[in-house]
Amino acid sequence: MYTLICEVSEEQLEIASAIGYGCGMGGCVEGAGSGGLVSLTFYFEREEQAASAATAFAETLSIDTPAVGYVDDKQDWNAKWRESMEPAQIAAGVWVSPAWLEPPKEGRAAWIKIEPKMAFGTGHHETTRLAAKALIEGGDSVVNKSVIDIGTGSGILCFAADYLGAKRAVGVEIDGDCRENLAENLRDNPPRTGGNVAFIIGTPDSIRVNNDRCFDAVIMNMLLTESAPLLGQIVRIIKKDAALIWSGILVDESEEAVNAASGFGFKLSSALIENEWWCGTFAR
């Protein structure tokens, strides 16, 4: 198991957690650091995951690049994390939790069952909730439409799109380790009658489309440094009037995201904010 230790301010905690989740961390231990800072120890199964997180910490948080270490520790961090897990409400009436952890029935309109084998994509992070809320608030735009989710992770936003009545929802994920978890989640969330949910391990460039199979809407819940470079690939596989829901953006980076999207013909139509995270809905 590989470790990554860094010290951050209280204001940087949420960002650091999002980076760790996005890079596939298996767990994190928080402690007291020097000078009033918070010490974070992240645990990863693979060295390349830890190295990717180290680079992201240095670039996004402007701190010294943390060193990647190795510990001979067989502790199951995902198992410990599952012990303290609670259902997450990602939007009004829409809950996310594993099949073995039923959310409250009162006022529940939908239950998306996600196995917690991936820390990111369980509905507990602001960026996931923001993307889901934007998708649900603009639900009419996906009814009988085709939707693509870039960086789908656990597939949660594809299942939300299917719940809203999407004709087709395709999730794209570059991390091959997500394959098994996506298969389990698809088994636990079979598409409703008339719907279709599928997942692809690869990049947007790996998708083959024609005029009849271009997408009506695209969702991205990824850090700006990872998602902005994909805009050029995305416009190739969507319709001219497609909508874009873009989450995973810090409030301080929202102007940069709007400018990047406008370069590809997207205009901001609405935005949502939770704590220091921003999500924009764009139209073309």
Image: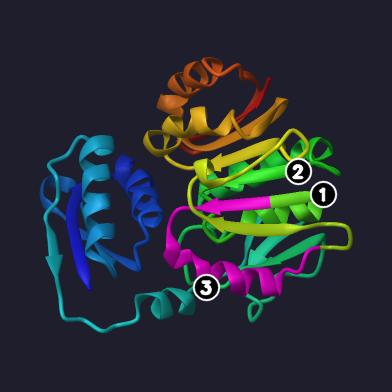
Residue at x 84% of width, y 43% of height: 143
> Is residue 260 at all visible to an observer of this figure?
yes
Left or right: 33 in relation to 222:
left
- Amino acid type, residue under disc 2 in the picture: Ser
> Is residue 92 at all visible to an observer of this figure?
no
Whether the residues at callouts 2 and 1 have beta carbons within 8 Å, the answer is yes
Mark 2, other Cα within 10 Å: few <14 / some 14–19 / many ≥20: many
Say whether disc 3 or disc 1 marks the residue closer to the N-terminus.
1
Residue 148 sits above or below residue 281 on the image:
below
Compute the Cα span from label 3 to label 1. Answer: 24 Å
Residue 204 sits above or below residue 178 on the image:
above
Residue at x 48% of width, y 24% of height: 257
Say whether disc 3 or disc 2 marks the residue closer to the N-terminus.
2
Q: What segment is highlighted magenta in the picture?
A: 170-191
Residue at x 26% of width, y 51% of height: 52
Q: How many marks?
A: 3
Mark 1, other Cα within 10 Å: few <14 / some 14–19 / many ≥20: many
- Amino acid type, residue under disc 3 in the picture: Glu
Screen quadrant of the C terminus: top right
Q: Which residue is mark 3?
A: 180
Screen quadrant of the N terminus: bottom left
Residue 122: percent from left, percent from top: 55, 61
Residue 41: percent from left, percent from top: 22, 62
Q: Which residue is mark 2?
A: 146
Q: Which residue is mark 1?
A: 167
Q: Secondary structure at mark 2?
A: strand
Q: Residue furthest bottom?
A: 74
Residue at x 61% of width, y 52% of height: 171
